[in-house]
Image (cartoon, rainbow, N blue to C red):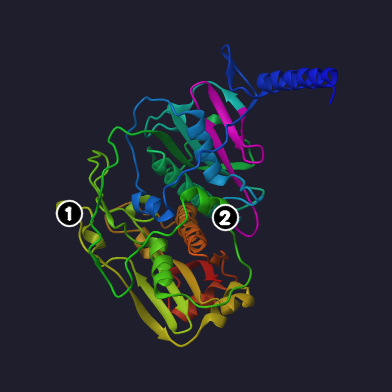
Amino acid sequence: MGTEALKNKVVVLGILTLFLSSVFVAQTQGEVQSHYLLPSPLLVDMKLEETMFRRMSVREFTPELITDEELSTVLWAACGYQSQGGRTIAGINGTYSGIIYVLKEDAVYTYDPVNHSLVFFKEGDWRDVVGWQYQAPIQLGLCYDTIKADSLFGGAELGQMGQNIQWMANALDLGTVVCGQTPPAIEPLGIPENQEGMIVMPLGHLVYEYDFKNRPFWVSSLPKIQTSSLTLSEALDNRTEGTSFTGSLTKVQLSQLVWCTYGFSPYVDRSGQEKNVVKRHRTLPSAHGYYPLCMYAVTQQGVFYYQPNLFMRFQKTPVDFIGLPILTFLMKKISGDHRLEVAEAAGHPNIASAPLIMLTVLDLEMTRPAGKDDLSGEGDRRFWYFEAGASAHNVLMEATSWGLSAAVFPPADAAAVQSLLQLDETYLPLFVIPVGH
């Protein structure tokens, strides 16, 4: 290339850079811009299971600002695009309906995962209006497109996004908590009619630094939970869904996969948060701390009920200062191979060869405990799908970390699942999750 041509190329590149800077810089000389690119996400080297161990709700934040690099990393984790073109979350029924509103001091933006950028939505500081429960430098509003999904599957997709946000925030030494209410807190913002708000997640730096002590006290015939070789960033970038499954699982893999659905952390939280009395956290949050889901493992040997911890009722008591034991097991309910029945009930007979099929079932009675808020109504069902989506996402991620694959299907014949598990109409099957090679 000649000298003159090289000079011309430099000039063109300079003009292009100047143009992009004017379009994509978030805020220049006090003016709110309509669209700006986020920096590349940071690579987090914390192992996936470590982020599950550390998952907790944080409700108190300092005024310290969130950097663009931190925000970029959290948003990419939430629902961004992988390096090979997939997404960090699974589309329920192959559809992606989730939308994230990013509330900053200057304005409200939406996250564009295709371009990994923020798109201007509305000027002004709406953080204390929408995120009134907990003040934080950033408020994330999770919504779904009602044209693409109903409140149940939309909620399940947002549950996956919520998990990724919590994990990545924790790995970056930030904090967040899942906040849901009816009517949605984001309503005053005036979002489009085809969108429905559901969750607000404040994002900020910690008032009380994380302080975890490893107190596993694992009492089980299942192998103790281990960390795999993949980091959180690697697991998010490599997560896939399978369409057919084969092979067998080791006992370690089985233990990891059932634990991640609803289990307890081996860590005890010593951070001293005044607004969080839980000492041993679980692999996902639950509305009002009800945890009304039941997990069943279907294998060639039979159908098993997963008991996360017989001591779960005591996890908030002062005695848990040192960490109560985790007494966990799989209890056989039905002998024999019933995987084909489950596969047909799911509407996907091809998954019958999967060595493990997890079933997520909602116990409605546990959503209306005596003396507490009744969350068993149809309008509250989306919050339990949010929880079920988070649990299913854990399986997808854990399968990836152990060289396996998984998928998530709503049951086509819920009554058939109820019949197999010998459950009445107060138990609602939500998802079927095959896992294998």
Near-viewer residue (300 or 379): 300
Image position, residue 41 (x, y; %): 54, 38
Q: Which kind of residue does numbered mark 1 sit on?
A: Ile
Image position, residue 368 (x, y; %): 35, 58
Near-viewer residue (176 or 384): 176
Report whether 284 appears left or right of 79: left
Q: Which residue is drawn at 56% across and 56% down?
A: 239
Count all numbered tags in the image, as a single digit: 2
In the rendered structure, are the residues bearing label 2 and label 1 in contact, judged by CB atoms less than 8 Å apart? no
Q: Mark 1 points at which residue?
A: 322
Residue farthest to the front? 2
Residue farthest to the top? 29
Q: Name the residue under label 2.
A: 238
Between tags 2 and 1, which lies in front?
2
- Residue 289 seen in this snapshot: yes
Determine whether 393 is above or below 63 in the image.
below
- Please tell me whether residue 384 belongs to the stretch shown in magenta: no
Range of residues picked out in magenta? 92-120
Placement of the C terminus among the 4 image quadrants: bottom right
The image quadrant of residue 4 is top right
Determine whether 413 is above or below 379 in the image.
below
